[in-house]
Image (spheres, grey):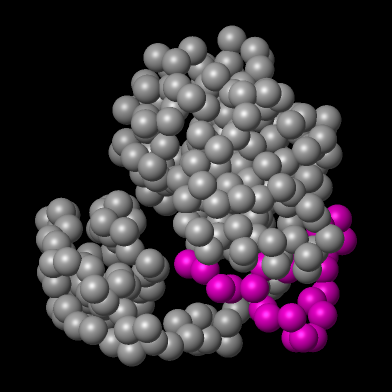
Amino acid sequence: MPYRRLVFLLPPDREDALVTELWLAGTLGVQSAAAGDGRLRLEAYFPADLKPFHPSLPEGIEVNADEVVPDADWFAAYRERSRPFPVGRMLFVDPREPGEEAAEVPVGRRLLRLPARAAFGTGSHESTSLALELLEDADVRGRRVLDLGTGTGILAFAALLSGARSVIGFDVDPAAPFHARDNSALNGLRPRLFAGRLAALPERPLFELAVVNVIPEEISSEMAHLVRLLRPGAEVILSGILAERGPQVLGRWRALGLAERDRRTAGEWIAFRLGLG
């Protein structure tokens, strides 16, 4: 099907702020490249039948094009440039399609095959890598883990590799669990996956760890519900947060009884590990 493509020109330091606005507006995916004049050229894709809208543009950003384009394999060029890479201390991610020559895995790392079929989730984005770092420093062994915004399943897989007793991963994007299921088969790791929201989960059993790698607005209305699904002493790993908004997000979780135990930062992003009770 065709897509609506918006093209923006912007200073590099405005990229994260714009991407956040576009995800909140419902973009299907974004990609950026150098524009040749010191700025970035960022493309965002939406359904072609989307009603006209005007995203809240941070200062210094201009709309360069607004057009309808035919369907295409948007990740073909990315896959051609993709190479396996290390993430955190434990993973070595191969974003290539099955059938490629086997990657040489560094000693001490576990190969995770995640074909590049989605904009986020392979671990290359700071929000995912920060969540993984905090997950590696948490005691996951024997815990029941909930992965909110599972995407391609990378954090659910990392939790299982770290000794989790069980992992449930879900995403509001109906396509995400299908990508994660395919990746599950590729890697021999079996989290339970579904598309939906927290309301689909039973009230028991309770979880000992929740990993939340989504834009804060996507979980804000369900924060209290999530806390009710946690055991006393459980932990929550939060990512997908712009650093400038970190204090505000942290304050909301503190009001629900969680205290900060650790944090990580990278570029414009920040992630927290919080404890309950």
Query: Residue 195 or 44: which is nearer the viewer?
Result: 195
At 80% across and 55% down in the image, what residue appears?
Answer: 189
Q: Position of residue 22 (x, y in %)?
A: 28, 59
Looking at the image, residue 164 lies above or below residue 9: above
Query: Which quarter of the figure has residue 135?
Result: top right
Q: Position of residue 168 (x, y in %)?
A: 68, 42
Q: Is residue 66 visible?
A: yes
Most common secondary structure along the magenta stretch? loop
Residue 105 magenta: yes
Apparent side of residue 195 relative to residue 11 in the rendered image (left or right):
right
Q: Position of residue 41 (x, y in %)?
A: 27, 76
The number of callouts visible is 0
At 68% across and 81% down in the image, what residue appears?
Answer: 97
Looking at the image, residue 243 lies above or below residue 99: above
Quarter of the rendering occupied by the C terminus? top right
At 49% across and 12% down in the image, what residue appears?
Answer: 257
Looking at this view, name the residue that lies furthest to the top.
277
At 45% across and 40% down in the image, what residue appears?
Answer: 270
Apparent side of residue 244 relative to residue 78 in the rendered image (left or right):
left
Query: Which quarter of the figure has residue 4?
Result: bottom left
Quarter of the rendering occupied by the N terminus? bottom left
Apparent side of residue 274 relative to residue 21 in the rendered image (left or right):
right
Q: Position of residue 182 (x, y in %)?
A: 70, 67
Span of residues in magenta: 96-119
Q: Is residue 155 visible?
A: no
